[in-house]
């Protein structure tokens, strides 16, 4: 079985223990053996005609050697970021200048969600904290388990995803629970960056087992549910087929990709299939007006036409370097690797046009588009902004 990220494998075993209380010893041994046999990291290819690109600015939060994905967020000219030790900062997007810094007695997980008058964060201990834009605590409530991914803030609710397969709508003002969506996961699931997306009346969530669902944002009732892929194989490891990353929404469609499965786009209103293709990704996907982009399980960057899924280009120069989810920004597609390198690809051809570096630590979350560039957060807590070509 190809293993795209060792931390994802260990997380799968941990999730099994969380949900069922124990792991069959032989199954756990097989899973850890598969992870430990991951091949060495290939060397970076020579730059050739590509250019070195320096960071516009960098700043540092405390990091973690654990694979705890913490995604930053942007609201206007403000960037909000968190670290596992309970630190939250607001930075100026143009120069990285620190506006404020707060510390809380928690271990943050998932990252920051933003709204017009609020930011929200979840914790490994199963709490949700809502803050004013100036960092003042509004409310703090407990949910059922670890918060996976950044909270989603809508005009009516704060929506969080938890490790026990729940999606919960919390009152915007008080944090009181208003609705609860729950599904039954398969025995083994991937642990990694997961996020919710929203458009109109729906919240879109990729589920373990390869399904994509649209949840009514008012009451948490599913509007539709459709398979992105169907689990295949004879062992629980072979049958892992989770939707990874965050569903991507564009115009009339929502798109998603699964591990050991497929990538596809579906009608926003009813979930009907528009197109799908074979693809396995442990990290997720993104898109723009022309294409959708993903990194497959071998860390090949793939671009497919958004309209019909026709192949647009592939970039295999970073195969085996455990790439992040790509980000589409300006005329470039940006992707990071497990040694903190940032790779800039031509959006039309996939050609490598530049490379930057951060702190040498893995990047577990997608680059964040900011005005004129992208922001990278590494596992060790470095935040680095890079320019992109327009």
Image (tube, rainbow, N blue to C red):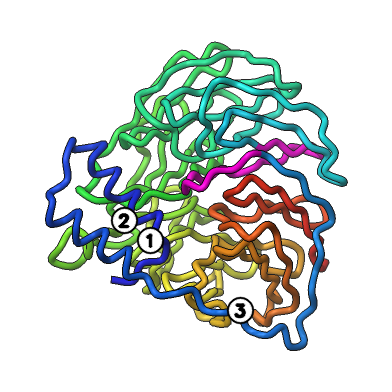
Which residue is the site of mark 2?
A: 210
Which residue is the site of mark 1?
A: 258
Expressed as whole percent of the image width and height from the top left, the position of residue 210 reads 31, 55
Q: Quadrant of the N terminus?
A: bottom left
How many numbered discs?
A: 3
Q: Secondary structure at mark 3?
A: loop
| 374 up-or-down from 14: above or below | below
Q: In the image, what residue occupies the spot 24% across and 44% down?
A: 16
Expressed as whole percent of the image width and height from the top left, the position of residue 62 reads 63, 39
Closer to the N terminus: mark 1 or mark 2? Answer: 2
- In the picture as drawn, the residue positioned furthest to the bottom comes out as 48
Which residue is the site of mark 3?
A: 44
Q: Secondary structure at mark 1?
A: loop
Measure the C-alpha gap from mark 1 to mark 2. 6 Å
Circles 1 and 2: CB atoms closer than 8 Å:
yes
Q: Is residue 176 visible?
A: yes
| Region in magenta | 62-81
Mark 1 crowdedness (10 Å alpha carbons): few <14, some 14-19, many ≥20: many
Observer-nearest residue: 250 or 330? 330
| 192 up-or-down from 309: above or below | above
Expressed as whole percent of the image width and height from the top left, the position of residue 41 reads 49, 74
Measure the C-alpha gap from mark 2 to mark 3. 33 Å
Q: In the image, what residue occupies the spot 58% across and 56% down?
A: 363
Classify residue 31 by image quadrant: bottom left
Observer-nearest residue: 7 or 327? 7
Observer-nearest residue: 82 or 227? 82
């Amino acid at each position: 079985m190809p293993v795209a990220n060792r931390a994802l494998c260990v997380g799968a075993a941990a999730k099994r223990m969380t949900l069922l209380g124990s792991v069959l010893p032989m199954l756990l041994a097989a899973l850890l053996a598969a992870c430990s046999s991951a091949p060495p990291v290939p060397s970076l290819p020579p730059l050739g005609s590509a250019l070195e690109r320096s960071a516009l600015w960098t700043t540092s939060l405390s990091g973690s050697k654990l694979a705890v994905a913490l995604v930053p967020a942007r609201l206007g000219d403000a960037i909000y970021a968190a670290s596992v030790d309970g630190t939250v900062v607001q930075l100026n997007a143009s120069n990285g200048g620190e506006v404020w810094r707060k510390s809380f007695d928690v271990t943050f997980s998932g990252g920051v969600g933003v709204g017009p008058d609020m930011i929200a964060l979840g914790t490994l201990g199963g709490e949700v904290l809502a803050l004013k834009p100036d960092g003042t605590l509004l409310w703090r409530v407990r949910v059922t388990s670890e918060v996976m991914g950044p909270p989603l803030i809508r005009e009516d609710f704060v929506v969080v995803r938890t490790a026990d397969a729940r999606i919960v709508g919390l009152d915007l003002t008080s944090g009181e629970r208003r609705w609860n969506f729950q599904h039954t996961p398969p025995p083994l699931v991937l642990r990694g960056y997961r996020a919710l997306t929203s458009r109109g009346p729906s919240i879109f969530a990729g589920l373990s087992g390869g399904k994509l669902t649209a949840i009514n944002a008012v009451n948490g009732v599913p509007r539709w549910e459709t398979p992105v892929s169907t689990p295949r194989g004879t062992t629980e490891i072979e049958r892992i087929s989770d939707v990874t990353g965050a569903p991507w929404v564009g115009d009339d469609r929502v798109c998603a990709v699964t591990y050991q499965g497929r990538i596809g786009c579906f009608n926003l209103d009813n979930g009907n299939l528009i197109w799908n293709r074979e693809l396995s990704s442990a990290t997720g996907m993104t898109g723009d007006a022309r294409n959708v982009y993903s990194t497959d399980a071998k860390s090949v960057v793939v671009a497919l036409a958004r309209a019909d899924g026709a192949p647009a280009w592939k970039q295999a120069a970073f195969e085996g370097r455990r790439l992040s989810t790509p980000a589409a920004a300006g005329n470039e597609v940006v992707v990071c690797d497990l040694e903190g390198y940032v790779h800039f690809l031509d959006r039309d051809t996939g050609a490598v046009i530049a490379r930057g570096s951060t702190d040498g630590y893995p990047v577990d979350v997608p680059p964040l588009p900011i005005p004129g560039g992208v922001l990278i957060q590494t596992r060790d807590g470095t935040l680095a902004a890079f320019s992109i070509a327009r």
